Image: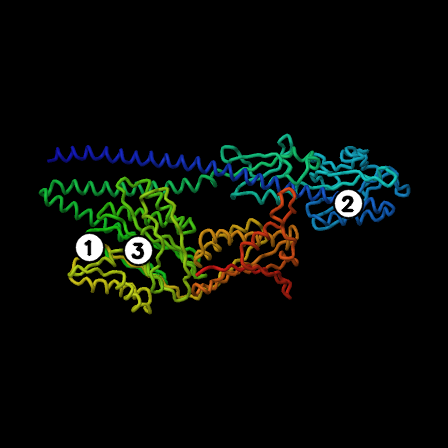
Amino acid sequence: MKASLAHVRAKGIPTLIGAALFIVVIMGGNLYKDYRQDQENARLLMESKLRIANLNIMWELYDVKMAIDELGQKVSEQLNRPDNMYGIAEETIETSTFIKAVFIAFSPNYYPSKGRWFQPRCIRHDSLLVREQGGRKTHDYFKQKWYRDVDGDTLCRPKWTPPYVDHSQHNAIVMTLSKPVYDKKGKMAAVIGIDVSLQTLQKLLKGIEPYAGSVCQLLDSEGHMLVSTDDTNYSPERFLIATTTLTPSNSTSSEMVDSTNKLQVRLAIPKRAVFGPAIRQNLISLALMITGLLMLAFIIQRSLHNLFILNKTREQQQIIEGEMRIAHDIQMNMLHQDFPPSLHAALIPMKEVGGDLYDFYQKDDALYFIIGDVSGKGLPAAMVMAGTVATFRIASRHLDTPLEIVSEINSVISERNPNLIFITAFVGKLDTRHGLLTFCNAGHNPPVLNGQLLETDPDIPIGYDANYVFHQHGALFTQGSLLVMYTDGITEARNTKRQFMGTKRLMSAVSELSKEDVGSLTEAIISETCKFMGPAEQRDDMTLMCIRNDAAAQSPAIIINNDVEEISRLKPLIRDYCECMGCSQQNTRKIRLAIEEAVVNVINYAFQKGELGTIRIDMQAQPATDELHKGRLTFIITDSGKPFNPLAQQAVDVEQAINDRQTGGLGIYLYQHIMDKVTYERTDDGRNVLTLIKEIGS
């Protein structure tokens, strides 16, 4: 007997080692796959951010070019008033915080009374604007590159200098855009110029850093650093690095950027920020795998111990009972018992352990929950149940929607499911603040919402196809709403007459007990089911989860800064709200596009460039009552910017060719044609109020 036991152990230990090595190899492959994917995503993100930096810098330089053209026109008109030049320079510098200095360098002795050097200029020192006469013998501006490059240029083309150190501006690194100005006699009167400090580019560069610890720098043509957002000493071993050369956009001519196109923007992001999350997730998965392997090893060892102390029948019975106890412990220990006031659940396992499950997770104002039923019985079902709950807990902490959570669970289970064990599941997210319920039904029984079955076209169960595309639905969950979810162990419970409990009896019990709190309601429904069964044997796990919204729901509203980057915060709330009002996916996408375009218009036209402000978006709903009375979605966009009525803008002609079409107006055209009604109001307290209304069917 001892020899046989040693033989079995000798075969079992290498098998466990082989299984462990197999898991390590699989996890290593997944880790390498995630590493390559994250590396590619990081590369695309860096390219996108560098393109944004290129566009931002080029547009700022384009504004400078427009400013110098206006400056040239004003100087030409005021040549007979030399003392007015200081005011003209100050007016120009006030047009943009991007400008460091503005000067008007007159030709030698152009005004005899002013001497050989006459250079009125205005310089920005922090928040102060200082007028001064810059021309003097010790500062002979006729020798400066910006003067020599345009001296005698009858075409009056503006030219940029390469970056240089300006000692008259506290050693600031600047680029100068200069052009000549001629009087009515055709004589060159002056060279006008605008200095741009490269330090002002730091704000633009700082805005494109995608991760904490990223570094963005502006380099000259030889790779020397001009501006950096951080003093961090980065290296290729610890950072991913990408560089691009500034190039003009379609709206900026090459003559405007003849010197700036040699500048480079470099972006470095820490590798730990890119690859860290994937590594942590794989380590968690590896830990779960090893835990399962250790459990399996424990069961095998226990089975081997019992194999040689009992007869064959007794041995098999004890092995089964041991496995069932462990499976039962796995199942019950995975279940939460610390319920929030709005939720309660119960799971009554059968003698033969099944795979019913439930779980929940509270994140800010969102309550995530799952109820499910694993196919099969015994230890395999219990192991899959444990893996499903563990994956839900990880996914609900890092993902936002039930659709994403179900897809993640399906991906994990399907990739490691040789026995084709599947799970029916109902996964939901309750926005308790706004009374919005979004959910994904993966082949599970339809729950009871406010006395009615919440029926949708259910998706397939989890575990069949890793690439299956699930669907998300929504419903309003206002104050007093009650959601009752269950597994088929409730509705398929049978009495001694072989009659089923059925959905009708369940809905009747819910209706009679709906005034109870969720804890009492859960216990009462379980009690009613057991009473219906009588002495009949329980054939399946019975699981029930009840959720009630006792809080008064607020109409959804969000306040964002007047920054295009803030638009991403709008998308989840608009999507959930439209889904809960019964909008199709196509209408939801259109409505979201309309609101985003309206908000972008407010950001671009209601606020001055660089002005800080906020925008409030309120959402109101009037549900459809019947086929004749449609529902209505109302979105109210309020801002405190300057008066801007988008409805008064000239309508864009979409039939025209793109090259002939007027600039702007397409966004206004889009949301006016997507929404059923758009109104504008300027309130007495100085606010713009744009209201967009969309009618929805019953």
Question: Looking at numbered disc 3 in the image, what kind of residue is underneath it?
Answer: Asn
| First-in-chain label (3 vs 1) | 3
Instruction: Measuring from the top left, give residue 496's x and y in whole percent.
Output: 15, 61
Q: Quadrant of residue 503?
A: bottom left
Q: Quadrant of residue 675?
A: bottom right
Instruction: Measuring from the top left, give residue 679's x and y in whole percent.
Output: 59, 61
Q: Quadrant of residue 346?
A: bottom left
Q: Which mark is residue 71?
A: 2
| First-in-chain label (3 vs 2) | 2
Disc 3 packing (10 Å; few <14; some 14–19; many ≥20): many
Disc 1 packing (10 Å; few <14; some 14–19; many ≥20): some
In the image, is residue 359 above or below residue 243? below
SS for callout 2: helix
Disc 2 packing (10 Å; few <14; some 14–19; many ≥20): many
Cα–Cα gap, marks 3 and 1:
18 Å
Q: Quadrant of the C terminus?
A: bottom left
Q: Residue at x 21, y 60 (%)?
A: 500
Instruction: Measuring from the top left, give residue 68's x and y in whole percent.
Output: 75, 43
Which of the two discs, 3 and 1, sits closer to the camera? 3
Instruction: Measuring from the top left, give residue 7's x and y in whole percent.
Output: 16, 32
In the image, taking residue 88 as reference, residue 643 lies left or right, namely left
Label 1 sits on residue: 539
Q: Quadrant of the N terminus?
A: top left
Cα–Cα gap, marks 1 and 2:
88 Å
Question: Looking at numbered disc 2 in the image, what kind of residue is underneath it?
Answer: Leu
Answer yes or no: is residue 341 visible.
no
Question: Looking at numbered disc 1 in the image, what kind of residue is underneath it?
Answer: Arg
In the image, is residue 448 above or below residue 215? below
Label 3 sits on residue: 445
